[in-house]
Image (tube, helix red, strand yellow):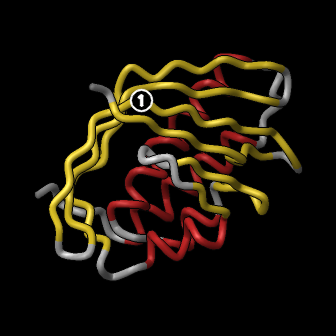
Amino acid sequence: MRAKPTLSVVSVLLFTASVLAQSSPKQPDSQIDTLLALERMWNQAQLTRDVAAIRGIIGDRFVNTEWDGSFSNRGQFLADIADPKFKPSVLSDSDMKVSLYGTTAVVTGTYHAKGTSHGKPYEHVGRFTDTWIFVAGRWECIASHSSLRK
């Protein structure tokens, strides 16, 4: 099991991403770095079940499509993360690519998730697509989709 970062580490990461996100979306390299940092912070926040950190990353109208085809809105997604029966031990991304479209970005990659949920172990390796928008001076994720690799 990986060591979990403390709340202060996640807070520092969120602050750093917030500062980076204040730059104009017209600077592609800077925006790509910011989006990749936000994706990594999201993983860390999920590992520690830090709902407040995730709330600051996803939009008010966030929609999620899980690997099994189920949908959830922002409130449902955050409740699932906060559920004490959800105990992730590994959550990592690789092969991430960012495509910028003005004030919209699409991040794709491969993920590895492992842990227990409701007492049952799980391990998933799959693909994800996250859609981000630059609004009010910051990036926020408005949609996420994951699917298992066979």
The residue drawn where x is 49% and y is 53% is 13
The residue drawn where x is 78% and y is 39% is 133
Image coordinates for residue 131, horizontal then vertical, percent: 68, 36
Measured along the vertical axis of the image, is residue 133 above or below residue 84?
above
The residue drawn where x is 77% and y is 62% is 60
Dot 1: few (<14), some (14–19), or many (≥20) neighbours within 10 Å? many
Q: Nearer the viewer, residue 68 or 99?
A: 68
Measured along the vertical axis of the image, is residue 35 above or below residue 16?
above
The residue drawn where x is 20% and y is 59% is 115
> For the N terminus, which image quadrant?
bottom left
The kind of secondary structure element at disc 1 is: strand
> For the C terminus, which image quadrant?
top left
Q: Which residue is mark 1?
A: 127
Q: Quadrant of residue 53?
A: bottom right
Q: Nearer the viewer, residue 82 or 124?
A: 124
Residue extending furthest toward the front: 69
Image coordinates for residue 36, horizontal then vertical, percent: 52, 32
Residue extending furthest toward the left: 1
Which amino acid type is marked by label 1? Arg
Q: In the rendered view, does 70 fall on the left or right side of 95? A: right
Q: Nearer the viewer, residue 131 or 53?
A: 131
Image coordinates for residue 98, horizontal then vertical, percent: 59, 21
